[in-house]
Image (cartoon, grey):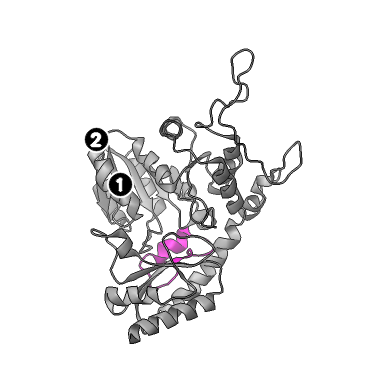
Amino acid sequence: MKDVSISAASLAAQAMGWVDPVTKAVVPPIHMSSTYQRDTDNNYSSGRIYARADNPTFDQVEATLAALEGGSKALVFSSGMSAACACFLAWSPGDHIIVPKVMYWSLRNWLATFATHWGLKIDFVDADRTDAIAAAVRPGATKLIWLETPANPTWSISDIAAVAEIAHKAGALLAIDSTVATPVLTRPIELGADIVMHSATKYLNGHSDIIAGALIGARDDAHWAKLRAIRAQLGTILGQTEAWLLMRGIRTLFPRVQWACRSAQSLAERFAGHPMVAAVLYPGLASFPGHTIAARQMRGGFGGMLSIRVKGGERAAIATAARVDLWKRATSLGGVESLIEHRASVEGPGTPCPPDLLRLSVGVEDSSDLFNDLDQALRRAHNA
């Protein structure tokens, strides 16, 4: 777009104002070709060689993500896990990395098994405590600090700016899993982060119909070139149709996230005094331990994710989830439909998730309908 002062919401809605120069279409085509023709002089003047390295369908979605996050470049991946794993595979055996104790379970499990067996030195810390992160740093050895904020499924908050200072003082990079916050609420690069990761399956796409991931880099440097090479060499490339659908989803990112934030805030406040709820975990509540930091680094809301801890323990929590009608009992988050999940059952042995916790992903339904459905489920489970 010519007007550089345009808001991020408008930029996303119009996909950076893209219009096909030939057909004048306002929606980009899907480029299905797996390979590209050489010129007669044996060069590739188009810059394209083979679709495992890149595809024209990626251009618009990657440029839009980089602009939304205030980054230099973006890469889309076949999943959030493949995007996250690339950040760790860029380092060598013996390198030290700091990660949260509370984070996306599949990545946590991969780090505790494959990554450590491969030779990375991983320290799991309480990432909502800046002093714990600082104490874990090994001068000369720490290469990466990884944060997830808000952190799934307790929604604890890490101070991005403070940890960025710690990381850079140690000569390390800071990467942020900002899947839950999205660029609507937080732009980690502005706070000092070097890399932002999204499970684009979630809010960026927002329709529960693709699996995708994304990395956004603050700089197009040698480390970024390594991440790009990892994607190409491992073949963790996003499908052309999925890239097109991701761009489709990003165009409604702002209204979806803003609606979910308002509903989640309302639900958190209403369930905070519920007789069958022991605790509500949501950064938008003034009583939440990370609220002050969240208010400083999140703008326009505190996200569409919250958790409740059900009185009566694990059995009552599972019984509650079994009795909802409007909420869907399913894994994932960030879609237009609201989801409920007994997270400890999914994560299994070794999970740090409390057994009485239900994770709630708030969609775009009416918040009163969502409250009434979960309220009746809580009461029926309590009386069962």
Residue 25 horizontal side relative to residue 363, left or right: right
Q: Which residue is mark 1?
A: 110
Q: Residue at x 61, y 57 (%)?
A: 252
Most common SS among magenta residues:
loop
Secondary structure at badge 2 equals loop
**Residue range (magenta):** 283-305
In this view, 370 is above or below 137: below
Quadrant of the drawing holding the N terminus: top right
User: Which callout, 2 or 1, points to the residue nearer the camera?
Assistant: 1
Q: How many marks?
A: 2
Q: Is residue 305 above or below residue 87?
A: below
Q: Which mark is residue 354?
A: none
Q: Position of residue 239 (x, y in %)?
A: 52, 41
Mark 2–mark 1 Cα distance, whole angstroms, equals 17 Å
Among all residues in the image, which is located at the extreme bottom? Answer: 383
Q: Answer whether residue 4 is visible to the viewer in this image.
A: no
The spot of residue 191 in percent (x, y) is 46, 50
Q: Local crowd at mark 2 within 10 Å, few (<14), some, or many (≥20)?
A: some
Query: Which sits in the foreground, 3 or 266?
Result: 266
- Name the amino acid type tagged 2: Gly
Q: Residue furthest right?
A: 23
Task: Say which mark, if any, is on residue 94.
Answer: 2
Residue appearing at x 34%, y 87% in the figure: 383
Sequence-first disc among 2 and 1: 2
Give the residue at the far top of this rendering. Answer: 41
Q: Tag 1: residue type?
A: Trp
Residue drawn at point x = 39 percent, y = 84 percent: 379
Q: Can you tell which quarter of the image residue 33 is in?
A: top right
Observer-nearest residue: 217 or 165?
217
Element assignment for label 1: helix
